[in-house]
Amino acid sequence: MKNTPKIKVGIVAVSRDCFPESLSVGRREALVRAYGEKYDAGDIYECPVCIVESELHMVQALEDVRAAGCNALCVYLGNFGPEISETLLAKHFHGPKMFIAAAEESGEDLIGGRGDAYCGMLNASYNLKLRNVRAYIPEYPVGDAEDCADMIHEFIPIAKAVVGLSSLKIISFGPRPMNFLACNAPIKQLYNMGVEIEENSELDLFEAFHKHAGDKRIPAVVKEMEEELGQGNRKPEILAKLAQYELTLKDWIQEHQGYREYVAVAGKCWPAFQTQFGFVPCYVNSRLTAQGIPVSCEVDIYGALSEFLGTVVSGDTVTLLDINNSVPKDMYDSEIKGRFDYTLKDVFMGFHCGNTAAGKLAFCEMKNQLIMARSLPEEVTQGTLEGDIIPGDITFFRLQSTADNVLRAYIAQGEVLPVATRSFGSIGIFAIPEMGRFYRHVLIEGNYPHHGAVAFGHFGKELFEVFRYIGVPAGEIGYNQPKGVRYPAENPW
Protein backbone atom coordinates (compact mmCIF):
# COMPACT_ATOMS: atom_id res chain seq x y z
CA MET A 1 0.00 0.00 0.00
CA LYS A 2 1.31 3.42 -0.97
CA ASN A 3 0.69 5.39 2.21
CA THR A 4 2.66 8.62 1.72
CA PRO A 5 2.01 11.45 -0.74
CA LYS A 6 4.13 12.26 -3.75
CA ILE A 7 4.58 16.01 -4.05
CA LYS A 8 4.74 18.03 -7.25
CA VAL A 9 5.31 21.75 -6.65
CA GLY A 10 3.95 24.15 -9.24
CA ILE A 11 6.22 27.21 -9.52
CA VAL A 12 4.29 30.32 -10.54
CA ALA A 13 6.19 33.57 -10.97
CA VAL A 14 4.41 36.85 -10.34
CA SER A 15 5.15 40.41 -11.42
CA ARG A 16 3.81 43.84 -10.51
CA ASP A 17 2.80 45.51 -13.76
CA CYS A 18 4.97 48.58 -13.15
CA PHE A 19 8.11 46.40 -12.91
CA PRO A 20 9.83 44.63 -15.83
CA GLU A 21 8.12 41.29 -16.43
CA SER A 22 11.43 40.02 -17.80
CA LEU A 23 12.84 40.03 -14.27
CA SER A 24 10.32 37.43 -13.14
CA VAL A 25 10.67 35.36 -16.31
CA GLY A 26 14.46 35.19 -16.17
CA ARG A 27 14.58 34.59 -12.44
CA ARG A 28 11.96 31.83 -12.63
CA GLU A 29 13.92 30.09 -15.40
CA ALA A 30 17.13 30.34 -13.36
CA LEU A 31 15.35 28.92 -10.31
CA VAL A 32 14.04 25.93 -12.27
CA ARG A 33 17.50 25.25 -13.71
CA ALA A 34 19.09 25.48 -10.27
CA TYR A 35 16.57 23.03 -8.79
CA GLY A 36 17.10 20.50 -11.59
CA GLU A 37 20.87 20.66 -11.18
CA LYS A 38 20.72 19.93 -7.45
CA TYR A 39 17.52 17.93 -6.87
CA ASP A 40 14.97 15.77 -8.69
CA ALA A 41 13.44 17.90 -11.45
CA GLY A 42 10.32 15.72 -11.22
CA ASP A 43 9.51 17.41 -7.90
CA ILE A 44 8.60 20.67 -9.63
CA TYR A 45 6.59 22.06 -12.52
CA GLU A 46 7.33 25.41 -14.13
CA CYS A 47 4.11 27.19 -15.03
CA PRO A 48 4.78 28.55 -18.55
CA VAL A 49 1.33 29.98 -19.25
CA CYS A 50 1.91 33.43 -17.86
CA ILE A 51 3.58 35.63 -15.33
CA VAL A 52 0.81 36.56 -12.91
CA GLU A 53 0.18 40.30 -13.06
CA SER A 54 -3.63 40.35 -12.80
CA GLU A 55 -6.57 38.37 -11.49
CA LEU A 56 -7.17 36.93 -14.97
CA HIS A 57 -3.57 35.76 -15.10
CA MET A 58 -4.13 34.22 -11.68
CA VAL A 59 -7.01 32.12 -13.03
CA GLN A 60 -4.92 30.98 -16.01
CA ALA A 61 -2.01 29.97 -13.78
CA LEU A 62 -4.31 28.19 -11.33
CA GLU A 63 -5.88 26.13 -14.12
CA ASP A 64 -2.46 25.29 -15.53
CA VAL A 65 -0.88 23.99 -12.33
CA ARG A 66 -4.00 22.00 -11.57
CA ALA A 67 -3.95 20.43 -15.03
CA ALA A 68 -0.28 19.57 -14.54
CA GLY A 69 -1.15 17.55 -11.43
CA CYS A 70 0.50 19.87 -8.93
CA ASN A 71 -0.57 19.30 -5.33
CA ALA A 72 1.66 22.02 -3.85
CA LEU A 73 2.36 25.58 -4.96
CA CYS A 74 5.33 27.94 -4.88
CA VAL A 75 4.46 31.60 -5.48
CA TYR A 76 7.72 33.17 -6.62
CA LEU A 77 8.11 36.93 -6.39
CA GLY A 78 10.50 37.64 -9.24
CA ASN A 79 9.92 41.30 -8.48
CA PHE A 80 7.69 43.27 -6.09
CA GLY A 81 4.65 41.25 -7.14
CA PRO A 82 0.90 41.98 -7.36
CA GLU A 83 -0.22 41.53 -3.77
CA ILE A 84 -3.90 40.90 -4.59
CA SER A 85 -3.50 38.49 -7.50
CA GLU A 86 -0.71 36.47 -5.90
CA THR A 87 -2.58 35.96 -2.65
CA LEU A 88 -5.79 35.09 -4.49
CA LEU A 89 -3.78 32.42 -6.29
CA ALA A 90 -2.79 30.99 -2.91
CA LYS A 91 -6.35 31.27 -1.62
CA HIS A 92 -7.85 29.28 -4.48
CA PHE A 93 -5.13 26.65 -4.75
CA HIS A 94 -6.28 23.44 -3.07
CA GLY A 95 -3.01 22.29 -1.47
CA PRO A 96 -0.11 23.60 0.62
CA LYS A 97 1.63 26.73 -0.66
CA MET A 98 4.79 28.67 -0.04
CA PHE A 99 5.96 32.20 -0.86
CA ILE A 100 9.57 33.05 -1.71
CA ALA A 101 11.21 36.11 -3.24
CA ALA A 102 14.11 36.84 -5.55
CA ALA A 103 17.21 38.60 -4.28
CA GLU A 104 18.89 41.26 -6.40
CA GLU A 105 21.68 39.82 -8.54
CA SER A 106 24.30 42.51 -9.01
CA GLY A 107 25.41 45.88 -7.75
CA GLU A 108 26.02 46.75 -11.41
CA ASP A 109 22.31 46.49 -12.26
CA LEU A 110 20.25 48.27 -9.61
CA ILE A 111 18.21 50.51 -11.88
CA GLY A 112 16.48 48.49 -14.61
CA GLY A 113 17.41 45.23 -12.90
CA ARG A 114 16.14 45.99 -9.40
CA GLY A 115 13.02 43.96 -8.51
CA ASP A 116 12.23 44.97 -4.92
CA ALA A 117 10.88 41.52 -4.04
CA TYR A 118 12.31 42.01 -0.54
CA CYS A 119 9.69 44.73 -0.13
CA GLY A 120 6.97 42.82 -1.96
CA MET A 121 7.18 39.90 0.45
CA LEU A 122 5.97 42.17 3.24
CA ASN A 123 2.82 43.07 1.32
CA ALA A 124 2.28 39.45 0.35
CA SER A 125 2.39 38.32 4.00
CA TYR A 126 0.01 41.12 5.01
CA ASN A 127 -2.50 40.14 2.31
CA LEU A 128 -2.28 36.45 3.20
CA LYS A 129 -3.26 37.33 6.75
CA LEU A 130 -6.14 39.52 5.56
CA ARG A 131 -7.52 36.60 3.56
CA ASN A 132 -6.92 34.01 6.30
CA VAL A 133 -4.69 32.05 3.93
CA ARG A 134 -2.08 29.76 5.46
CA ALA A 135 1.19 29.61 3.60
CA TYR A 136 4.71 28.51 4.38
CA ILE A 137 7.24 31.35 4.37
CA PRO A 138 10.83 30.19 4.98
CA GLU A 139 12.86 31.61 7.84
CA TYR A 140 14.62 33.94 5.40
CA PRO A 141 12.49 33.85 2.24
CA VAL A 142 14.67 35.97 -0.09
CA GLY A 143 17.49 34.46 -2.14
CA ASP A 144 19.16 33.82 -5.46
CA ALA A 145 18.23 30.88 -7.69
CA GLU A 146 20.23 28.33 -5.68
CA ASP A 147 18.92 29.63 -2.36
CA CYS A 148 15.31 29.47 -3.56
CA ALA A 149 15.84 25.96 -4.94
CA ASP A 150 16.95 24.90 -1.44
CA MET A 151 13.85 26.54 0.05
CA ILE A 152 11.54 24.60 -2.28
CA HIS A 153 13.34 21.36 -1.45
CA GLU A 154 12.90 22.06 2.28
CA PHE A 155 9.19 22.72 1.64
CA ILE A 156 8.56 19.28 0.13
CA PRO A 157 8.43 17.23 3.40
CA ILE A 158 6.25 19.95 4.93
CA ALA A 159 3.92 19.76 1.93
CA LYS A 160 3.84 15.96 2.20
CA ALA A 161 2.60 16.19 5.77
CA VAL A 162 -0.07 18.77 4.94
CA VAL A 163 -1.31 16.82 1.90
CA GLY A 164 -1.24 13.60 3.91
CA LEU A 165 -3.35 15.04 6.72
CA SER A 166 -5.93 16.32 4.25
CA SER A 167 -6.61 12.76 3.08
CA LEU A 168 -5.84 10.69 6.18
CA LYS A 169 -8.17 8.31 7.94
CA ILE A 170 -7.30 7.03 11.41
CA ILE A 171 -8.89 3.67 12.19
CA SER A 172 -9.17 2.88 15.89
CA PHE A 173 -10.31 -0.24 17.72
CA GLY A 174 -11.94 -0.24 21.10
CA PRO A 175 -12.08 2.36 23.86
CA ARG A 176 -8.92 3.27 25.73
CA PRO A 177 -7.86 0.77 28.39
CA MET A 178 -8.79 1.69 31.94
CA ASN A 179 -6.35 4.09 33.64
CA PHE A 180 -5.25 5.44 30.27
CA LEU A 181 -7.08 8.74 30.26
CA ALA A 182 -3.68 10.14 29.28
CA CYS A 183 -4.44 8.89 25.76
CA ASN A 184 -7.55 11.09 25.70
CA ALA A 185 -8.32 12.00 22.08
CA PRO A 186 -10.85 14.80 21.48
CA ILE A 187 -11.70 14.31 17.81
CA LYS A 188 -12.80 17.86 16.93
CA GLN A 189 -9.23 18.95 16.17
CA LEU A 190 -8.84 15.94 13.87
CA TYR A 191 -11.71 17.23 11.77
CA ASN A 192 -10.27 20.74 11.91
CA MET A 193 -7.08 19.39 10.33
CA GLY A 194 -9.00 17.49 7.65
CA VAL A 195 -8.41 14.07 9.22
CA GLU A 196 -11.21 11.48 9.29
CA ILE A 197 -11.59 9.09 12.21
CA GLU A 198 -13.33 5.70 12.17
CA GLU A 199 -13.83 4.27 15.65
CA ASN A 200 -14.60 0.56 15.83
CA SER A 201 -15.34 -2.00 18.49
CA GLU A 202 -12.59 -4.47 19.29
CA LEU A 203 -15.35 -7.10 19.08
CA ASP A 204 -15.71 -6.29 15.38
CA LEU A 205 -11.96 -6.79 15.00
CA PHE A 206 -12.18 -10.08 16.91
CA GLU A 207 -14.88 -11.31 14.54
CA ALA A 208 -12.82 -10.31 11.49
CA PHE A 209 -9.78 -12.11 12.94
CA HIS A 210 -11.71 -15.37 13.28
CA LYS A 211 -12.95 -15.06 9.69
CA HIS A 212 -9.29 -15.11 8.61
CA ALA A 213 -8.64 -18.50 10.22
CA GLY A 214 -7.09 -20.79 7.63
CA ASP A 215 -6.43 -17.90 5.21
CA LYS A 216 -4.30 -19.25 2.35
CA ARG A 217 -1.95 -16.25 2.62
CA ILE A 218 -0.86 -17.08 6.18
CA PRO A 219 2.11 -19.37 5.29
CA ALA A 220 3.64 -16.69 3.04
CA VAL A 221 3.43 -14.08 5.83
CA VAL A 222 4.88 -16.56 8.32
CA LYS A 223 7.83 -17.10 5.96
CA GLU A 224 8.40 -13.32 5.79
CA MET A 225 8.39 -13.17 9.57
CA GLU A 226 10.83 -16.06 9.88
CA GLU A 227 13.24 -14.37 7.46
CA GLU A 228 12.97 -11.05 9.28
CA LEU A 229 13.45 -12.54 12.74
CA GLY A 230 16.27 -14.91 11.83
CA GLN A 231 17.89 -16.25 14.99
CA GLY A 232 15.55 -14.04 17.02
CA ASN A 233 12.61 -16.29 16.16
CA ARG A 234 12.18 -17.50 19.75
CA LYS A 235 8.41 -18.08 19.56
CA PRO A 236 7.79 -19.88 16.23
CA GLU A 237 4.56 -21.37 17.55
CA ILE A 238 2.87 -17.94 17.62
CA LEU A 239 3.77 -16.77 14.08
CA ALA A 240 0.70 -18.24 12.35
CA LYS A 241 -1.64 -16.33 14.67
CA LEU A 242 0.36 -13.13 14.21
CA ALA A 243 0.22 -13.58 10.43
CA GLN A 244 -3.53 -14.09 10.65
CA TYR A 245 -3.84 -10.86 12.61
CA GLU A 246 -1.64 -8.94 10.16
CA LEU A 247 -3.83 -10.04 7.26
CA THR A 248 -6.93 -9.09 9.26
CA LEU A 249 -5.65 -5.54 9.75
CA LYS A 250 -4.56 -5.12 6.13
CA ASP A 251 -7.89 -6.35 4.80
CA TRP A 252 -9.73 -4.11 7.26
CA ILE A 253 -7.75 -1.12 6.01
CA GLN A 254 -8.49 -1.96 2.39
CA GLU A 255 -12.21 -2.43 3.07
CA HIS A 256 -12.59 0.64 5.32
CA GLN A 257 -10.24 3.13 3.70
CA GLY A 258 -13.15 4.63 1.78
CA TYR A 259 -12.32 7.75 -0.19
CA ARG A 260 -9.23 8.58 1.87
CA GLU A 261 -5.79 7.98 0.38
CA TYR A 262 -3.78 7.41 3.57
CA VAL A 263 -4.39 5.41 6.74
CA ALA A 264 -3.03 5.09 10.27
CA VAL A 265 -4.28 2.71 12.96
CA ALA A 266 -4.77 3.11 16.70
CA GLY A 267 -4.97 -0.44 18.00
CA LYS A 268 -6.01 -2.14 21.19
CA CYS A 269 -3.56 -4.43 22.95
CA TRP A 270 -4.88 -4.93 26.51
CA PRO A 271 -6.50 -5.86 28.91
CA ALA A 272 -8.79 -8.38 27.16
CA PHE A 273 -6.87 -8.57 23.90
CA GLN A 274 -4.33 -11.14 25.09
CA THR A 275 -6.79 -13.56 26.68
CA GLN A 276 -9.17 -13.50 23.71
CA PHE A 277 -6.81 -13.32 20.74
CA GLY A 278 -4.19 -15.44 22.49
CA PHE A 279 -1.20 -13.17 21.82
CA VAL A 280 -0.09 -9.54 21.93
CA PRO A 281 -0.01 -7.53 18.67
CA CYS A 282 3.28 -5.67 19.16
CA TYR A 283 5.28 -7.41 16.40
CA VAL A 284 2.47 -6.99 13.87
CA ASN A 285 2.22 -3.30 14.78
CA SER A 286 5.94 -2.95 14.12
CA ARG A 287 5.71 -4.67 10.74
CA LEU A 288 2.87 -2.49 9.47
CA THR A 289 4.64 0.65 10.69
CA ALA A 290 7.76 -0.43 8.78
CA GLN A 291 5.56 -0.83 5.70
CA GLY A 292 4.45 2.80 6.01
CA ILE A 293 1.17 2.20 7.86
CA PRO A 294 1.73 3.55 11.38
CA VAL A 295 0.04 1.57 14.14
CA SER A 296 -0.08 2.95 17.66
CA CYS A 297 -0.96 0.85 20.69
CA GLU A 298 -3.32 1.47 23.59
CA VAL A 299 -5.76 3.20 21.23
CA ASP A 300 -3.52 6.27 21.12
CA ILE A 301 -5.19 8.20 18.30
CA TYR A 302 -2.93 11.25 18.48
CA GLY A 303 0.03 8.90 18.80
CA ALA A 304 -0.95 7.31 15.47
CA LEU A 305 -1.39 10.78 13.98
CA SER A 306 2.07 11.80 15.19
CA GLU A 307 3.61 8.63 13.80
CA PHE A 308 2.04 9.34 10.41
CA LEU A 309 3.49 12.84 10.38
CA GLY A 310 6.91 11.46 11.29
CA THR A 311 6.66 8.88 8.52
CA VAL A 312 5.89 11.36 5.76
CA VAL A 313 8.34 14.01 6.96
CA SER A 314 11.27 11.63 7.48
CA GLY A 315 10.46 9.21 4.66
CA ASP A 316 11.41 6.45 7.07
CA THR A 317 10.04 4.07 9.69
CA VAL A 318 9.10 5.64 13.02
CA THR A 319 8.11 4.25 16.40
CA LEU A 320 5.97 5.17 19.41
CA LEU A 321 7.56 4.92 22.85
CA ASP A 322 6.83 5.62 26.47
CA ILE A 323 8.99 8.36 27.97
CA ASN A 324 9.59 5.63 30.42
CA ASN A 325 12.26 5.50 33.10
CA SER A 326 15.33 7.23 34.42
CA VAL A 327 18.82 5.88 33.88
CA PRO A 328 20.26 4.56 37.18
CA LYS A 329 23.04 6.74 38.53
CA ASP A 330 25.51 3.86 38.75
CA MET A 331 24.85 3.04 35.09
CA TYR A 332 25.27 6.70 34.12
CA ASP A 333 28.56 6.92 36.02
CA SER A 334 30.00 3.74 34.53
CA GLU A 335 28.82 3.97 30.91
CA ILE A 336 27.81 7.54 30.02
CA LYS A 337 29.64 10.07 32.17
CA GLY A 338 32.89 11.16 30.54
CA ARG A 339 32.02 9.38 27.28
CA PHE A 340 29.15 11.64 26.22
CA ASP A 341 28.46 15.30 26.93
CA TYR A 342 25.21 14.75 28.84
CA THR A 343 24.23 15.09 32.48
CA LEU A 344 22.23 12.47 34.33
CA LYS A 345 19.10 14.59 33.87
CA ASP A 346 19.62 14.71 30.08
CA VAL A 347 19.17 10.96 29.67
CA PHE A 348 16.23 8.60 30.04
CA MET A 349 14.98 5.33 28.63
CA GLY A 350 12.36 5.24 25.89
CA PHE A 351 10.47 1.95 25.95
CA HIS A 352 7.53 0.05 24.64
CA CYS A 353 6.59 -3.59 24.91
CA GLY A 354 7.82 -4.56 21.46
CA ASN A 355 6.34 -2.40 18.69
CA THR A 356 9.57 -0.98 17.20
CA ALA A 357 10.38 -2.35 13.74
CA ALA A 358 13.20 -4.89 13.44
CA GLY A 359 15.11 -2.52 11.15
CA LYS A 360 15.34 0.02 13.97
CA LEU A 361 16.71 -2.43 16.54
CA ALA A 362 20.38 -3.29 16.99
CA PHE A 363 19.25 -6.88 17.65
CA CYS A 364 15.84 -8.43 18.11
CA GLU A 365 14.13 -11.44 19.58
CA MET A 366 10.50 -12.51 19.68
CA LYS A 367 9.48 -12.86 23.33
CA ASN A 368 6.52 -12.66 25.65
CA GLN A 369 5.41 -9.40 27.24
CA LEU A 370 6.98 -9.50 30.70
CA ILE A 371 4.74 -6.90 32.38
CA MET A 372 1.54 -8.61 31.23
CA ALA A 373 2.95 -12.06 32.07
CA ARG A 374 3.14 -11.01 35.73
CA SER A 375 -0.64 -11.36 35.94
CA LEU A 376 -1.56 -13.54 32.93
CA PRO A 377 -0.52 -16.95 31.58
CA GLU A 378 2.75 -16.51 29.67
CA GLU A 379 1.43 -18.21 26.53
CA VAL A 380 -1.12 -15.44 25.86
CA THR A 381 1.47 -12.67 26.19
CA GLN A 382 3.69 -13.75 23.30
CA GLY A 383 4.22 -11.48 20.31
CA THR A 384 6.59 -8.71 21.39
CA LEU A 385 9.74 -7.81 19.49
CA GLU A 386 12.47 -7.04 21.98
CA GLY A 387 15.84 -5.40 21.50
CA ASP A 388 17.88 -2.25 21.98
CA ILE A 389 17.04 0.60 19.61
CA ILE A 390 19.80 1.48 17.15
CA PRO A 391 22.02 4.39 18.19
CA GLY A 392 21.92 7.63 16.24
CA ASP A 393 20.07 10.91 15.86
CA ILE A 394 16.38 11.04 16.76
CA THR A 395 13.52 13.52 17.03
CA PHE A 396 11.04 12.97 19.87
CA PHE A 397 7.72 14.71 19.18
CA ARG A 398 3.95 14.66 19.56
CA LEU A 399 0.91 16.50 18.22
CA GLN A 400 -1.97 16.51 20.70
CA SER A 401 -5.36 18.04 21.36
CA THR A 402 -6.02 18.90 24.98
CA ALA A 403 -9.24 17.91 26.70
CA ASP A 404 -10.52 21.47 26.15
CA ASN A 405 -9.73 21.26 22.42
CA VAL A 406 -6.49 23.24 22.20
CA LEU A 407 -4.03 21.96 19.63
CA ARG A 408 -0.45 21.79 20.90
CA ALA A 409 2.78 19.98 20.12
CA TYR A 410 6.32 19.41 21.27
CA ILE A 411 9.60 18.64 19.50
CA ALA A 412 12.97 17.66 20.98
CA GLN A 413 16.04 16.60 19.02
CA GLY A 414 18.64 14.30 20.50
CA GLU A 415 20.13 10.87 20.03
CA VAL A 416 20.00 7.25 21.12
CA LEU A 417 23.29 6.43 22.82
CA PRO A 418 25.32 3.33 21.92
CA VAL A 419 24.93 2.00 25.46
CA ALA A 420 23.35 -1.36 26.27
CA THR A 421 20.09 -0.95 28.19
CA ARG A 422 20.27 -4.25 30.12
CA SER A 423 16.46 -4.22 30.13
CA PHE A 424 13.49 -5.64 28.21
CA GLY A 425 11.10 -4.55 25.47
CA SER A 426 11.90 -2.27 22.53
CA ILE A 427 14.10 0.14 24.43
CA GLY A 428 16.94 2.61 24.14
CA ILE A 429 18.88 5.15 26.19
CA PHE A 430 17.86 8.54 24.86
CA ALA A 431 19.86 11.73 25.35
CA ILE A 432 18.24 15.13 24.79
CA PRO A 433 20.05 18.34 25.77
CA GLU A 434 18.37 19.91 28.82
CA MET A 435 15.89 17.02 28.98
CA GLY A 436 15.25 17.49 32.70
CA ARG A 437 13.94 21.02 32.19
CA PHE A 438 12.05 20.03 29.05
CA TYR A 439 10.45 17.13 30.94
CA ARG A 440 9.26 19.45 33.71
CA HIS A 441 8.30 22.60 31.85
CA VAL A 442 6.97 21.21 28.55
CA LEU A 443 5.87 17.61 29.08
CA ILE A 444 4.54 17.90 32.64
CA GLU A 445 3.53 21.56 32.49
CA GLY A 446 1.82 20.95 29.12
CA ASN A 447 -0.06 17.88 30.43
CA TYR A 448 1.24 15.61 27.68
CA PRO A 449 0.68 11.85 27.86
CA HIS A 450 3.54 9.41 28.27
CA HIS A 451 3.65 8.34 24.61
CA GLY A 452 5.95 10.14 22.18
CA ALA A 453 6.63 9.51 18.50
CA VAL A 454 10.23 8.96 17.45
CA ALA A 455 11.65 9.77 14.02
CA PHE A 456 15.12 8.47 13.24
CA GLY A 457 17.05 11.61 12.34
CA HIS A 458 16.78 15.32 13.10
CA PHE A 459 13.52 16.67 11.69
CA GLY A 460 12.68 19.39 14.21
CA LYS A 461 12.83 22.17 11.61
CA GLU A 462 10.36 20.44 9.28
CA LEU A 463 7.98 19.35 12.05
CA PHE A 464 7.93 22.84 13.55
CA GLU A 465 6.83 24.26 10.20
CA VAL A 466 4.22 21.52 9.75
CA PHE A 467 2.74 22.27 13.17
CA ARG A 468 2.63 26.00 12.42
CA TYR A 469 1.07 25.41 9.00
CA ILE A 470 -1.77 23.27 10.33
CA GLY A 471 -2.65 25.84 12.97
CA VAL A 472 -0.81 25.02 16.18
CA PRO A 473 -0.23 28.41 17.83
CA ALA A 474 3.47 29.27 18.01
CA GLY A 475 3.23 29.51 21.81
CA GLU A 476 1.86 25.95 21.96
CA ILE A 477 4.87 24.33 20.27
CA GLY A 478 7.23 23.28 23.03
CA TYR A 479 10.86 22.40 22.52
CA ASN A 480 13.94 21.80 24.66
CA GLN A 481 15.20 25.27 25.48
CA PRO A 482 18.98 25.64 25.52
CA LYS A 483 20.77 26.11 28.80
CA GLY A 484 20.31 29.67 30.08
CA VAL A 485 17.00 30.24 28.27
CA ARG A 486 14.20 30.09 30.83
CA TYR A 487 10.76 28.55 30.28
CA PRO A 488 7.84 30.90 31.09
CA ALA A 489 6.90 28.98 34.26
CA GLU A 490 10.44 28.09 35.29
CA ASN A 491 11.51 29.33 38.70
CA PRO A 492 14.31 31.86 38.07
CA TRP A 493 15.93 31.02 41.42
Image (spheres, rainbow, N blue to C red):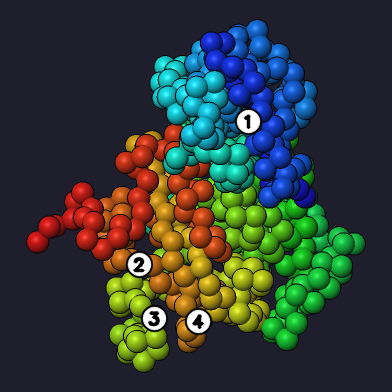
Find the distance from the CA under tag 1 to the CA under tag 4. Answer: 48 Å
Q: Label 3: which residue?
A: 340
Q: Residues within 10 Å of mark 4 (few under 14, many from 20)?
A: some
Q: Which mark is residue 324?
A: none
Q: Residues within 10 Å of mark 3 (few under 14, many from 20)?
A: few
Figure quadrant of residue 43: top right
3 or 4: tag closer to the N-terminus: 3
User: Is mark 4 in CB contact (under 8 Å) with mark 2?
Assistant: no
Q: Is residue 385 left or right of residue 433?
A: right
Front one among 396 and 280: 396
Front one among 86 and 3: 86
Find the distance from the CA under tag 4 to the CA under tag 2. Answer: 16 Å
Identity of the residue drawn at 40% across and 51% down? 410
2 or 3: tag closer to the N-terminus: 3
Figure quadrant of residue 160: top right
Identity of the residue drawn at 47% across and 70% down? 415
Q: Position of residue 59 (x, y in %)?
A: 67, 12
Would residue 267 be seen by someone viewing this image from the given angle? no
Using the image, determine if residue 446 lies above or below residue 433. above
Q: Residues within 10 Å of mark 2 (few under 14, many from 20)?
A: many
Q: Label 1: which residue?
A: 27
User: Is mark 1 in CB contact (under 8 Å) with mark 4?
Assistant: no
2 or 1: tag closer to the N-terminus: 1
Dot in front, 3 or 4: 3
Q: Which mark is residue 418?
A: 4
Q: Looking at this rendering, what residue extends furthest in the right direction?
A: 216
User: Is mark 2 in CB contact (under 8 Å) with mark 1?
Assistant: no
Identity of the residue drawn at 66% across and 71% down? 359
Q: Label 2: which residue?
A: 433
